[in-house]
Amino acid sequence: DVSKFVNASIDKVLHTLIEAFILVALVVFIFLGDWRSTLIPILAVPVSLIGAFIFMQLLDISINLITLFALVLAIGIVVDNAIVVVEAVHVKMAEENLSPYNAVKKVLGEISGAIIAITLVMTAVFVPVAFMSGPVGVLYRQFSITMALSIVLSGVVALTLTPVLCAMLLKNTHAMSKR
């Protein structure tokens, strides 16, 4: 019965998806150093992945082992844009002693182009695969479109949701430590 193998494989991929999400959260916490900063990428990743599911449905892409694998891989990639924004806000708050809101305003003016460039470059890696032909091309097409959707959505989230979360959740602890 092939369905047992497929169900077991999907369960393993979902398990890996959860493990990857936990590892990303742990690594972000280790490098950013506080829970408020970690919470922002943790919220940004599911928004990008859920958005990818919505667009997959609109494009009639099925959820299978290949697309689930793409989503597992996408977790590590989509978190990058959010981390870039959070780290830049931290640097602005520390260097210029700004409130989180003012730091976000300044940072968006400085790094929006970089976020867009990161998104376009990462998307350019996966889009050509969508044009492969043959039976294998169909599977790779689903993989590449899923990855590209996740990456583009992470760029949009990094320029919209992440700055709002930074302004709302972060505290300028750098000013307190200088006193």
Image (cartoon, rainbow, N blue to C red):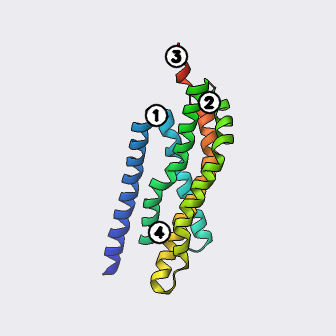
Q: Which mark is residue 178?
A: 3
Q: Work out whether mark 1 precedes mark 3 in sequence or the reverse, and give the earlier one.
A: 1
Report the mark closest to the observer, 2 or 1.
2
Residue ID for mark 2: 100
Relative depth, front residue between 119 and 52: 119
Amino acid type indicated by mark 3: Lys
Q: Position of residue 52 (x, y in %)?
A: 56, 62
Residue at image point 60% right, 43% down: 162
Between the C-alphas of marks 3 and 4, the distance is 48 Å
Residue ID for mark 1: 35
Q: Position of residue 5 (x, y in %)?
A: 31, 74
Amino acid type indicated by mark 4: Thr
Q: Secondary structure at mark 3?
A: helix
Residue at image point 60% right, 65% down: 55
In the rendered view, tell whether residue 138 sits above or below residue 94: below
Q: Secondary structure at mark 1?
A: helix
Q: Work out whether mark 3 precedes mark 2 in sequence or the reverse, and give the earlier one.
A: 2
Q: Secondary structure at mark 4?
A: helix
Amino acid type indicated by mark 2: Pro
Q: Position of residue 62 (x, y in %)?
A: 51, 73
Report the mark closest to the observer, 3 or 2.
3
Q: Position of residue 168 (x, y in %)?
A: 62, 33
Amino acid type indicated by mark 1: Trp
